[in-house]
Amino acid sequence: MTKIKKHDFIEIDYIGKVKSTDQIFDLTNKEIAEKNNIQMEHEYKPIIICVGEKNILKGIDDNLIDKEVGKEYEFTIKPEDGFGKRNPKLMKLINVNVFKKSNIMPMPGLQINIDGTLGTIRSFSGGRVIVDFNHPLADRELVYKVNILREVKDQKEKLTACMKFMNLTDDKFEIELNKDETIIRLKAHLDKTLKEMLEKKVLDLVPEVKKVKIELDIEKDIKK
C-alpha cells in the first residue's frame, strides 16, 4: 500500500466530533449529514489537501504522514493541535450601548460579529456584556475519523486544488497545460509579490510543472 508523505496530494472524507459530547461539528459526507439532520455552509463532498501545507487542522495534518491510502483512521486531537487553548485575554467587557446601536439584544450564548471578529456572549448584567472571542471549540479535545480515499496524481487536479487553497472558486481561474509552460489565468487582484509567491508555491508543490505563468484578468469572466 502507498504510504503518505509530506506534499502528497490526497482526497479524504472525514467526520469531526467533540470528544466529551460525541457531537458532530464538521464532516464531508452528505449521507451522514442528512442522516443526522446536520446543515453546514460548505458543500458535502470529499476534499483534496496537500499534506503538510496546513489545509486542515494541524492535528490531522501531522497524523497523516506514513498512513496508507485506502484506509480509515481515527485521530484524537488535543486542543493545541485543534482550535487552540482558551485565552483569558480574549474575554472582553463591552458596554451594552454598543449592542443597542446595532439593535442587538445581548443574550448569553448568542454569537455576534464585532468589527469582523466572531464572539460569543457569556454574560449580561448591569449594562455590561462579557463577550468571549475564543473559538467556540477552544480547549476541546476532538476526535476525527479520516478516510483516505486516494492519492491525487493528475497534474491539473493538483493545480486546481492549489487554487482552491486560496479560496478561489471554479469561476475565478482557468488552467492551461502546455508542453513547455503552464498558464494559470486568474480573475483576482494580486500584487507583484503575491503573484511571485503563488508561482513559487505552484512549482514547489507540483514539481511536474517546470514553468508557470500567472495571468491576471480582472474583467474577463472565466468560462468552464
Image (cartoon, rainbow, N blue to C red):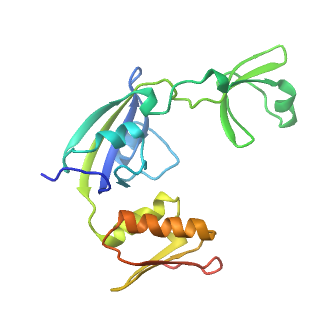
Query: Please, which residue is most extreme toward the left here?
Result: 1
Residue at coordinates 30% horizontally, 39% vertically from top-left? 63
Residue at 45% from the left image edge and 39% from the top image edge: 38
Q: Residue at x 51, y 79 (%)?
A: 223
x and y, in percent, of residue 30 in the image: 38, 48
Looking at the image, the residue that sits furthest to the bottom is 179
Q: Where residue 150 appears, x then y in whole percent?
A: 24, 56
In this image, 94 relative to 170: left or right? right
* Residue farthest to the top, as pictured: 126
Q: Is residue 123 left or right of residue 20?
A: right
Q: Quadrant of residue 80?
A: top left
Q: Which percent across, then down, holds residue 107?
A: 72, 23
Q: Is residue 19 above or below residue 13?
A: above
Left or right, 150 with respect to 203, comes to left
Q: How many marks?
A: 0
Q: Is residue 96 left or right of residue 59?
A: right
- Residue under the point 64% across and 24% down: 109
In this rendered view, identify the residue nearer to me: 115 or 111: 115
